[in-house]
Amino acid sequence: MKTKVIALDFGMKRTGIAISDEMKMIASGLRTVETRNLMQELKKIIEEESVDTLVVGQPKHIDGKPMQLEKNILYFIEDVQALFPSLVIKRIDERFTSKMAFQTMIDSGLKKKQRQNKGLVDEISATIILQNYLQYI
């Protein structure tokens, strides 16, 4: 059975979600959800899409030190691992993904009002995180 990879751009308010194709070559934005609803959303996606790997962005400062958010992400990962023991969880440096997402929005011709949609920025960031991961597997 072919499986997919999903990636998260985890935030305290919202989390962007991206998913790969079955060949694990192409990352596509899936959606952005309120982080408080993330676990139930993940359950649905993992069951419906036959996901075997979860990639979670690692927020770091420019100097490489972890950001404050990292503690929350580690708690979240523990919960996911308890619920889905066979799910492979990978981490990838997410520095600059929000800037890259914003630039992608500009490059694709989105109007200023559309670029202010933070949920879309999170979804594109998750897609960039996933695409970065897929390049190395």
Image: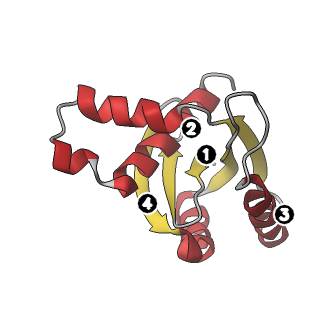
Q: Which residue is mark 2?
A: 130
Give the quarter of the figure containing the C terminus: top right
Mark 4 Cα within 10 Å, few/some/many (few <14, many 20+)? many
- The Cα atoms of the two marked residues, 4 and 1, are separated by 16 Å
- The Cα atoms of the two marked residues, 1 and 2, are separated by 8 Å
Q: Which residue is mark 3?
A: 85
- Please tell me which residue is depicted at 33% across the width and 30% down the height of the picture: 104
- Marker disc for residue 27: none
**Mark closer to the chain start, 4 or 1:** 1
Q: In which quadrant of the rendered view does residue 84 lie? A: bottom right
> Where residue 9 sits: x, y (%)?
56, 50
What kind of residue is marked 4? Thr
Front tag of 1 and 2: 2
**Mark closer to the chain start, 2 or 3:** 3
Q: Which residue is mark 4?
A: 32
Q: Which residue is mark 1?
A: 5
Q: Vertically, is 49 above or below 64?
A: below
> Where residue 129 sits: x, y (%)?
57, 37
Label 3, secondary structure: give it: loop
- Please tell me which residue is depicted at 60% across the width and 57% down the height of the picture: 50
- Please tell me which residue is depicted at 21% across the width and 49% down the height of the picture: 114
**In this image, 99 relative to 76: left or right?**
left
Label 2, secondary structure: give it: helix
What kind of residue is marked 3? Pro
**Mark closer to the chain start, 4 or 3:** 4
Q: Vertically, is 38 above or below 25?
A: below
Front tag of 4 and 3: 4
What kind of residue is marked 1? Val
Label 1, secondary structure: give it: strand
**Mark closer to the chain start, 3 or 1:** 1
Label 4, secondary structure: give it: strand
Q: How many marks?
A: 4
